[in-house]
Amino acid sequence: MTGEEIRDKINFNNQKIQSLMDPSVFILQPEVQKYMEDNEYLKSICPHKYENNTCIYCGHIINP
């Protein structure tokens, strides 16, 4: 996957997470967990390109 594809997929996953989460419920739903795990995998394969210590594709932050 390209960096742009990774960014798009992470954004899609984050939108799904936001739509599924209920601020009054404190239980992690399995579907939300699946999207979060997918985001972690995408970050692990991302061809990071950093600006201001943050990857422009996946949002990974490095310490300066």
Image (tube, helix red, strand yellow):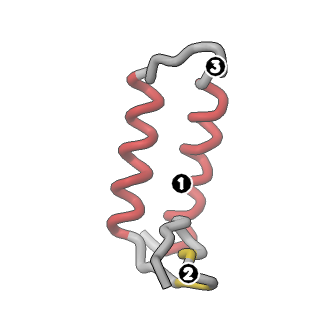
Of pointers 3 and 2, the one earlier in the residue sequence: 3
Of pointers 1 and 3, the one earlier in the residue sequence: 1
Say which residue label 2 marks: 53
- Estimate the x, y position of residue 56 in percent, counting from the top left: 60, 75
Query: Of discs 1 and 2, which sits in the foreground?
Result: 2
Residue 8 in the figure: left or right of residue 28: right
Query: Of discs 3 and 2, which sits in the foreground?
Result: 2
Q: Residue at x 44, y 51 (%)?
A: 39
User: Whole-Å distance between the Cαs marked 3 and 2?
Assistant: 31 Å
Tell me if residue 20 comes above or below residue 37 in the rendering: above
Tally of marks: 3
Q: Amino acid at mark 2?
A: Asn
**Badge 2 density bin: few <14, some 14–19, many ≥20, Cα 10 Å:** few
On-image quarter of the N terminus: bottom left
Task: Identify the disc placed on residue 55.
Answer: none
Say which residue label 1 marks: 9
Tag 2, which secondary structure? loop
Of pointers 1 and 2, the one earlier in the residue sequence: 1
Say which residue label 3 marks: 22
Tell me if residue 45 comes above or below residue 28 in the rendering: below
User: Whole-Å distance between the Cαs marked 1 and 2?
Assistant: 21 Å
Tell me if residue 39 comes above or below residue 4 in the rendering: above
Tag 1, which secondary structure? helix
- Estimate the x, y position of residue 25 in percent, counting from the top left: 57, 14
Q: Amino acid at mark 1?
A: Lys
Foreground residue among 54 and 15: 54
Query: Of discs 1 and 3, which sits in the foreground?
Result: 3
